[in-house]
Image (tube, rainbow, N blue to C red):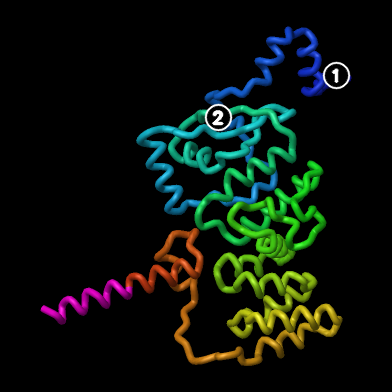
Amino acid sequence: MKQEPKKIDLGLKEAYEEMFMTQEQRDDKRREKILDLPLDELQPFKNHPFRVTQDGEMNELLRSIHERGIISPCLVRPRPEGGYEIISGHRRKAACEMLGLDTIPAIVREMDDDTAVITMVDSNQQRENLLPSEKAFAYKMKLEAIKHQGKTTSRQLVGKFESADEIADDESGRTVQRYIRLTNLIPDLLKLVDDGCVALTPAVELSYLPEELQEALLDACGMQDCTPSLSQAVKLRHMAAEGTLTPRKIQDIMREPKANQRDRLTFRADTFAQFFPKSYTVEQMEQEILRLLKQRQERSRDRDAR
């Protein structure tokens, strides 16, 4: 019977090779380098929370790379099993693939898992137009990494609202923890938050509902073509905590008229989605429609004034 060749543990192989290196060779191996790496050797970061979408920013990146090449190298770290894991540069890699390039310049840096997570989040969170879901999962990953490192903030990492003070430069620890709560929403409810149909504050309240009741709420929203107001979300959370919330009661609550409710003109988002980039949220579509209507109104006034 033919024996299969034994698989070599790459970690042991690397350690064995280092035994025969000079200290200068070891230092050189660990020194940060910029290399032109084949795209097929780069793997995405595990559980990468930021989306790579074909939006206006991507189109601008494609144009920039086509005209000037990669200005800022990617940041990667070696993988024990071979190849590299992207820390920063997922969009640049995708753009290079679209342009038919084979390689990309990248900084190769050794770093442990927690440092890699923190660096990955920090390098992405300054981007404009991040979705609530992207912030939610990114903040959660970074907070867990900081805890693993044993670091503390001025108020200690004990799970309170103030415990996430170091996660984002432009948002308070309270806000960060509110975003992290969104990771408890079922995907379809979280999508409503990303689409601008449910605001952050009521979404946080809904995140305390068990998954089966979130599913029931989603059904009620679909049947009645509505989303919960803050007062309704608070009521749903309190009843769930008391153990009195049922799918039938969710239907009843969602039928209640909202405070200051008045007649309004509404349109289904999917009616207009075909006219906008796929990355646009409902709020962005609404803003763009209002901008175009204002332009039309101004042109009409100019004609009337002639």
Q: Residue at x 78, y 44 (%)?
A: 151
Q: Residue at x 49, y 59 (%)?
A: 279
Numbered badge on residue 209 = none
- Asked if residue 174 is positioned above or below residue 265 in the image, the reply reads above
Quadrant of residue 207 within the rendered picture = bottom right
Q: Which residue is at the far front?
A: 154
Give whichever of 151, 47 is nearer the camera: 151
Which kind of residue does numbered mark 2 sit on? Ala
Residue position for label 2: 106
Pinpoint residue 51: horizontal percent, then vertical percent.
57, 51
Main secondary structure found in the magenta portion: helix
- Quadrant containing the N terminus is top right
15 vs 173, nearest the viewer: 173
- Of residue 3 and residue 134, the one placed in the foreground of this image is 134
**What residue span does the magenta drawing correspond to?**
293-306
Please give the name of the residue rendered at 85% of the width and 82% of the height, measured from the top-left corner: 242
Q: In the picture, residue 216 is in which quadrant?
A: bottom right
Q: Residues within 10 Å of mark 2 (few under 14, many from 20)?
A: many
Q: Is residue 290 magenta?
A: no
Kind of element beneath mark 2: strand
The x, y position of residue 248, in whole percent, is 76, 87
Badge 1 element: loop
Which residue corresponds to mark 1? 2
The mark that comes first in sequence, 1 or 2, is 1
Residue most toward the right? 1
Q: Residue at x 83, y 78 (%)?
A: 241
Circle count: 2
Name the mark nearer the viewer: 1 or 2: 2
Residue closest to the eye, 198 or 162: 162
Label 1: how many residues lie within 10 Å, few (<14), some (14-19) or many (20+)? few
